[in-house]
Image: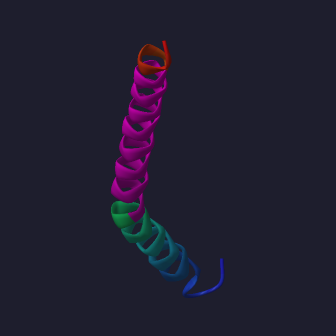
Amino acid sequence: MAPGTSDLILLILVFLGLQAWWIIPIIKKNNMINERGKELRDEIKHLEKIYKK
């Protein structure tokens, strides 16, 4: 291997790790919000059916 290759690989791995550290919680929170929105839409549809009668 050329000199510095291991340092470059380590730098790339650290960079990807730091990116994942802040992106993964954002994705998880977004999924939770989407699930809650789906529940609310289902509840709205149910209430609309009740009040249309």
Q: Magenta stretch: residue 43 in it?
A: yes
Measured as percent of width and height from the top left, residue 40 is found at: 39, 33
Q: Residue at x 43, y 53 (%)?
A: 27
Residue ranking furthest to the front: 53
Above or below: residue 52 compared with residue 22: above
Above or below: residue 38 compared with residue 29: above
Q: Magenta stretch: residue 22 in it?
A: no
Q: Which residue is drawn at 41% across and 51% down?
A: 30
Q: Quadrant of residue 24?
A: bottom left
Q: Which of 35 and 21 is in front in this view?
A: 35
Q: Which residue is drawn at 35% across and 65% down?
A: 22
Measured as percent of width and height from the top left, residue 21 is found at: 34, 62
In screen coordinates, is 36 left or right of 49? left
Measured as percent of width and height from the top left, residue 1 is found at: 66, 77
Q: What stretch is highlighted in magenta?
A: 23-48
Q: Which of 51 and 31 is in front in this view?
A: 51
Above or below: residue 20 compared with residue 29: below
Measured as percent of width and height from the top left, residue 25 is found at: 33, 54
Above or below: residue 46 compared with residue 1: above
Main SS of residues in magenta: helix
Q: Which of 2 and 42 is in front in this view?
A: 42
In screen coordinates, is 5 left or right of 18? right
Residue ranking furthest to the right: 1
Q: Which residue is drawn at 46% across and 33% down?
A: 41
